[in-house]
Amino acid sequence: MPLLFAIIATAFLIAPLFIVVPMSFSTSTSFAFPPEGYWLGYYRAYFASEDWLIPTANSIVIAFCAMMVTMLLVIPAAFGFVRHRFAGKAAINLLFLLPLAVPHVVAALGYYGLLSRLGIVGTIFGLIIAETALSMPVSFLVVCAALKGYDRNLERAAMSAGAGPLRTFFWVTLPVLRPGILVAALFAFLQTFNESVVALFIGGRDASTLPKKMFESIRLETDPVIAVVSTLLTGIVVLAFVVPVLFRRKPAYVV
Amino acid sequence: MSFDASAGRAPTPVYLRLTDVVKTYDGRTNAVDGVSLDIRRGEFITFLGPSGSGKTTTLMMIAGFEALNGGSIELDGKDLARSRPYERNIGVVFQNYALFPHMTALRNIEFPLRMRHFPKSDIKKRAEQALALVGLSRFADRHPRELSGGQQQRVALARGLVFDPDLLLLDEPLGALDKNLREQMQVEIKRIHREIGITTIYVTHDQTEAMTMSDRVAVFSGGKLAQVAPPLEVYNRPANRFVGEFIGDSNFFEADVDPKRPGWVDIPAIGPVRVAEDHGRLPSQGTIDLLVRPERIKILTANDGDHMNALDMTIDALVHYGDSVLAIGTSRGRPLRMRVAGTPPAELKEGARLRVGWAPQDAHAVARS
Ligand SMILES: Nc1ncnc2c1ncn2[C@@H]1O[C@H](COP(=O)(O)OP(=O)(O)O)[C@@H](O)[C@H]1O
Ligand SMILES: [Mg+2]
């Protein structure tokens, strides 16, 4: 039974790919399915069009910066949160997770008001701030979980080996937490890269992101280039998950 | 009679000295409550006691991971109070190994050498020697997850020893291993201790481990030291009822000292029994606890003289251990345990009533606490 559910769920998740991927190679000028013929013309169009490449670059820059800022904030926050007891801890925890509960449209309105007062609506900088706030909750949860599972005796072992706090952190704590931190960073990157509502509200013309461009492309013109973009994105994400698995050495257990 | 604090003071030069060490986590109760203890250079001392009695806390204070709330710890005449854990030269082995998962066995062992700035040429040599010492040379390039529990514990031991520490602290290092492996590792740890002669503090709640490995045993109870003595003395002459019951199997009788009849005590419902003068430091009056180990009780025959203390025992149950039999029964309504070594005699049956007894010098009297 669980297997059946798993199959159904997987089918729902990947079914769109069976339409989008063939369509990206289509010769048709609309979203006709199945395609009448196949060619690479729309791929050429994508890589030749500034209208697509600039939002792509924007998205990458914004997602990368938001990811970095998120991690710089979330890692110390998680340490403070997991390791120390302080008054109002539960309230602060709730506050940190609030962005998960607020609909993005509402959050976007809020950011619009705030950022326009600061004069940074429609800038990449403004978007980075807003997207960072949105990606923090999940990254925070992931790092907290990793930290809770971290055996503090490792730090004690490092100290008795002669390592001070700084060397203990960089030689032992950080490397051991690395998988959790990488997952949190990946979440932050993808969340920001894919986010469209806030990007639509405060992206403006100068800070147009890829999701915003795709949204507009669907609304204003029925341009099959969007199928190309979708295919490329899916391919990159799949690679990001599959490559590490393929290259991980699986050591055999020998007594 | 309370435990005589001076018994914890070693006669030969002191290497590690704990004086009135106190630790409280919550500000109300003392996890460690006034521990004073002297340890000689090269000694193998075991902290033995039930869970929660303050053994780990004491060890962590020696290592420098926990601050003292009172008292002092001196190593080789120097107060440790102001030195941080990484400024001390103390090796620690944790129960859960605490190996660095992202480093190979060799890297784990090299880690203290790198952190302590040993010369490059020395690092590889020393690490390889340490691996050889614990018999793991072949496994240098394995990560901890590729090693069995016993092998991981050996790597942890090598990592704790490799930088020639002043002290080696082991916190229940064999707690997670199965019985055969435990015994093998006990022998191994003793061998290593003999070979390099490092001053070692070994924490365990396993009395057999404490008995077989230690030069001295420090028995913890509720954050205090109940007794510090060589294993046989702790077994044969426990300082109080707690120690006697915690270590080994025991019969304890409450008995009244009769000031008018030296050499005799009176066990209510059983009657007067003889005690050897020198064997329990008896008060001149009051109530004492009389300890008789089950293996000191034997079935009496016609040949046994009347100097033996004799009782009638009703056998309720027999527990066969192969090399011995434990008879559980009662005498005049009081529980009594007797251990008979070797093949049990024919008359030792469930339901039997036997004449049993012990020699006066085989009992040990302690004051009531
Ligand atoms: N980090 C800690 N925080 C609060 N209480 C602790 C901590 N560590 C130990 N304790 C308490 O201190 C007492 C002694 O614990 P411990 O030294 O671990 O005993 P043992 O090692 O003999 O089992 C126990 O009551 C335990 O609950
Ligand atoms: Mg403990």
Image (tube, coloured by chain):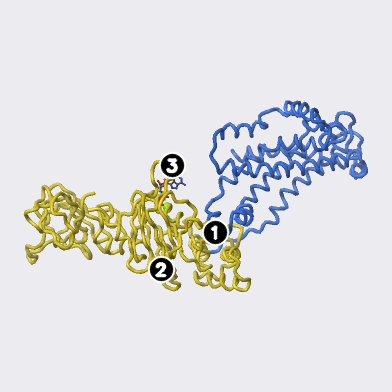
Chain colours: A blue, B yellow
Residue at image mark 1: B86
User: Is disc 3 on the same chain as disc 1?
Assistant: yes
Residue at image mark 3: B26
Label 1 is found on which chain of the structure? B
Q: CA distance from mark 2 to mark 1?
A: 21 Å
Label 3 is found on which chain of the structure? B
User: What crowding class fits label 2: few (fewer than 14 Cα within 10 Å), some (14-19), or many (20 or more)?
Assistant: some
User: What crowding class fits label 3: few (fewer than 14 Cα within 10 Å), some (14-19), or many (20 or more)?
Assistant: few
Sequence order check, earlier mark of 2 and 1: 2
| Residue B256 falls left or right of residue B169 | left
User: Residue A192: where, in percent of width, then height?
Assistant: 75, 38
User: Residue B26: where, in percent of width, then height?
Assistant: 43, 42
| Residue A42 falls left or right of residue B41 | right
* Mark 3: C-beta under 8 Å from nearest atom of ligand 1: yes
Q: What residue is drawn where x is 46% and y is 64%?
A: B167
Q: Secondary structure at mark 1?
A: helix
Between B135 and B192, which is closer to the camera in this rendering?
B192
Q: Amino acid at mark 2?
A: Arg
Q: Secondary structure at mark 3?
A: loop
Placement of B67 over or under B109, stated as above or below: above
Q: Quadrant of residue B218?
A: bottom left
Residue A12 seen in the current view: no
Residue B41 circle label: 2
Sequence order check, earlier mark of 2 and 3: 3
Residue B190 seen in the current view: yes
Between A136 and B141, which is closer to the camera in this rendering?
A136
